[in-house]
Amino acid sequence: MAAFLEHAGITRRMTDKALEVDAILQQWRRRIDKRELGQMALTELGLDIDLPKLDVLIATWAPSNEFGTETGETMVSTIATRLHIDPSRASRLVSELIGQGLLARGVSQQDARRTIVELTDKGRATVNAVRTIKFLLLGDFLSGWTDAEVETFLPLLDRFSTWSEESRAKGQSRLAPTIAELRAGLHKSAH
């Protein structure tokens, strides 16, 4: 692989660094997939909800640092879009959360024919407690870093977070011949 990447203009040093980054990301992905922090928060707080329901509560509240600056009323379809889930699944989760007293249906102020979803006081307190634990732990972890480390890390993490989109765009242009060569090699070896 290293020779092929070098042929494509990626130095062996960058290949080694890419392998290191990939290993870190794979370990991180496995931990994120387990949702350790969210599960720990639910357990520590003694909450009788699971992680998908927590996601719906947070998507209903829609903090701008996660969902952008979109404002307005939240409907079941809004939650489905924010979480990239099927509307019927979002509807089922919303109904269960209404049954638990964490969400309530309301009437749209913009169009009385629409039904909106809102956090109840209990739902708002739940979201606040879970997010407080999250930022308590993250803040405690980052407090061991210097200001310079944090100021260096944040813009780099933000920049890195777009690597797949940038790579895909480059793959359709500068790297297209190399990807075509790789694809041709696969088809040749299959015969």
Image (spheres, grey):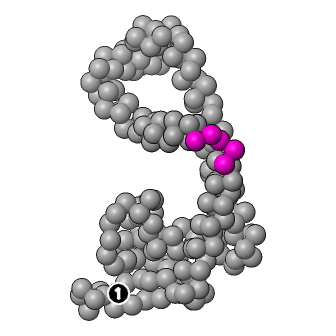
The quarter of the displayed image where residue 77 is located: bottom left
Q: Residues within 10 Å of mark 1 (few under 14, many from 20)?
A: some
Q: Secondary structure at mark 1?
A: strand
Q: Position of residue 38 (x, y in %)?
A: 65, 62
- Identify whether 160 is placed above or below 189: below
Could you tell me residue 11's position as x and y percent? Answer: 48, 10
Left or right of 106 in this view: 132: right
- Residue shown at the point (69%, 70%) measured from the top left: 42
Compared with 145, 46 (above or below) is: below
**Residue at 66% in and 48% down:** 143
Return the residue found at the far left: 111
Q: Which residue is mark 1?
A: 115
Which segment is the magenta one?
143-147
162 part of magenta stretch: no
Task: Locate residue 112, reporting x and y percent.
Answer: 26, 92
18 lies left or right of 66: right
Q: Is residue 64 left or right of residue 35?
A: left
